[in-house]
């Protein structure tokens, strides 16, 4: 089990970082990969506009990250 998190990151930022931390040669024996994201994305936009991610973008970011994992 490898646990990796980025404090305060939302899906917008994780989508950028994910390809930089994944190396296809390391994923040949991976059985499961779990993405736990959403709390930072759902912050109230008025309170933290830099961290807030609208629902449609959140959905597209997750799809993009899963697609990145399928390539590995």
Image: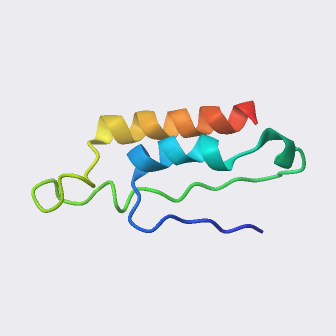
Which residue lies at the image location 55% right of the left edge and 66% below the top edge? Answer: 5
Q: Quadrant of the N terminus?
A: bottom right
**Position above or below: 26 against 3:** above
* The residue positioned farthest toward the left in the image shown: 46
Residue 27: x percent and y percent? 82, 46
Which residue lies at the image location 53% right of the left edge and 47% below the top edge? Answer: 17
Report the coloring of the rendering: rainbow
Residue 28: x percent and y percent? 88, 44
In-image side of 35 versus 46 (left or right): right
* The residue positioned farthest toward the right in the image shown: 29
Residue 35: x percent and y percent? 57, 54
In-image side of 18 versus 37 (left or right): right
Which residue lies at the image location 26% right of the left edge and 42% below the top edge? Answer: 54
In-image side of 3 versus 25 (left or right): left
Residue 48: x percent and y percent? 18, 59
Q: How many marks?
A: 0
Q: Quadrant of residue 44?
A: bottom left
Q: Quadrant of the C terminus?
A: top right
**Position above or below: 17 against 48:** above
**Position above or below: 56 against 40:** above
Which residue lies at the image location 79% right of the left edge and 39% below the top edge? Answer: 24
């Amino acid at each position: 089990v490898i646990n990796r998190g980025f404090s305060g990151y939302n899906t917008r930022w994780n989508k950028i970082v994910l390809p930089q931390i994944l190396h296809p040669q390391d994923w040949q024996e991976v059985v499961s990969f779990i993405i736990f994201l959403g709390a930072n994305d759902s912050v109230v936009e008025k309170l933290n506009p830099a961290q807030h991610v609208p629902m449609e973008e959140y959905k597209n970011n997750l799809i993009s990250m899963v697609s990145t994992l399928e390539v590995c």
